[in-house]
Amino acid sequence: MNNEVKYMTKQFISVSSITYAMKAKSILRNYGIYADIVKTSKISDSKGCGYSLVLLKNADKAVSILKENNINILAVN
Amino acid sequence: MIYLDNAATTFPKPRAVYGAVNSAIQNYGANPGRSGHKMSLKAAELVYNCREAAANFYNAPNVENIIFTPNCTYALNTVIMGFLKPGDNAVVSNVEHNSVLRPLEFLKSREVSYTVADVVHGDFDATVDNFRNAINQNTRLFVITHASNVTGTILPVGRLTALAHQYGIKVLIDTAQTSGVLPIDVQELNVDFLAAPGHKGLMGPMGTGILYIKEPESLSPLVCGGTGSSSLDLKQPDTLPDRFESGTCNLPGICGLKKGIDFVNSVSIKKIHNHEYSLLVSLYDKLSRINGVVLYTPKPSAEYNAPLISFNVTGKSSEETAEILNRRYSIAVRAGLHCAPLTHKMLGTEETGAVRASMSYFNNNNDIAALANAIKNISYFENKKFK
């Protein structure tokens, strides 16, 4: 049950490539937001292949920061 | 061996470079940017770290403006072949390498023309005037080496870029002989494209190169293929760096390049340049005192010379001199035409070539003295032969 709750609270921010995922991770770290990088699980979110940032909290803030830094976000789940 | 062929590729490399290459192969040998497992993500992180280091090194506005290529030639070709369209004209200097001249010559079959502007050593005004006079209504690109790979002559790339932009012309600079030796700030110079080898002044392994692209919109990719992104879309991605980085990258090379850039930063460009320039001045001074030595590099000044020098021993072809240096003195230099035919035509050395000695941070005054003494002996015996 606990694991399921934890899983449900994860949020994914899909970006176009590994470079932008790395860049986004680095930008967020400067704002004190820590994210991991995973392959985007929903093929449709990335037009085929791509990477996402996974966060347990602060996803809205993270999206806002990334947009301000011209990171193209493909999807937020 | 005394290695003075650093304009071809630097040797030795900093120790950390060897370690990084080895570690990448042994510990992180997964494909970066393709999979989601730990090793692939770690490999991708290492590539990103190098991209970030290169972006900082050249003061690129964004990390994705840095493209990894297999070498400087590939970077130059990406721009020349991808930018120029039928009817376009490019202006180049008369000290360009074949990595610039051959693609332009190839493009003649696609109705692309090019015009050659003469470089005047030690006179930036005259060089800029020659470029201005070479512009025509179809000129869309300047391709300019930052320094000649034969004479070391430095070109005023900042001024030439300002000139080009007055006419809406884009600028590609070839930093094969200057990256890691002279300070280069792409935003200050305002260049549109920069090509660099990773394995020369940046001290990385062979098989590495860098292309800086300010705005990708005007450039078609040289190679299309898998990028690990947007795979359902058959169109090549528009985003950097993927648009210009199809296929698996050279992870071990890139990891080594990162350590090379770190090394250059840790020593500092200023210290590296001062050291290499002092060796150049010393070698010029010694060679200029030897009877029978013809120097093709004008007396050095820090403003006008990169740290390399070309010369011949009267009565010997450059290849003969280099062969004696190698066999009898264990000194490595580069003879011949250095893939720069127009430069040698300018120097009048198309038939003989020239001997080129090029320094790195790892050379010292003993190396310079050994080369000068060897040349003195070779010249002495050659002169004696004719008496």
Image (spheres, rainbow, N blue to C red):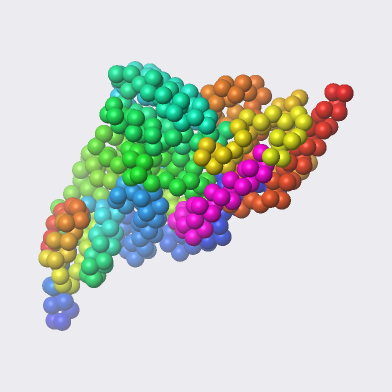
Residue A43 higher or lower than B42, as above or below:
above
Q: Is residue B104 visible?
A: no
Residue drawn 15% across the image and 53% down it: A74
Question: Image quadrant of residue B189?
Answer: top left
Coordinates of residue B249 in the picture (x, y in percent): 40, 49
Question: Is residue B2 found left or right of B83 in the rendered image?
Answer: right
Does the rendering let one see residue B2?
A: yes
In the rendered image, residue B192, in percent from the top left (x then y), is placed at 32, 38
At x 29% / y 18%, what residue is drawn?
A: B137
* Vertical arrangement, residue B158 with respect to residue A73, above or below: above
Residue B376 rendering spot, x and y as whole percentages? 78, 37
Q: Would you identify the image quadrant in which residue B115 lies?
A: top left
B378 versus A5 height, above or below = above
Judge from the rendering whether residue B302 lies leftward or rightward of residue B127; answer left or right: right
Front residue (pair A59, A49): A59
Magenta-highlighted residues: B256-284
Task: Identify which residue, B182 or B11, lies in the foreground.
Answer: B182
- State whether the magenta stretch is mostly helix, strand or loop: helix
Which quadrant is home to the C terminus of chain B? top right
Question: Against B324, is B253 above or below?
Answer: below
> Residue B90: x percent and y percent?
37, 24
**A3 within the magenta span:** no
* Residue at x-position 76% and y-position 29%: B292
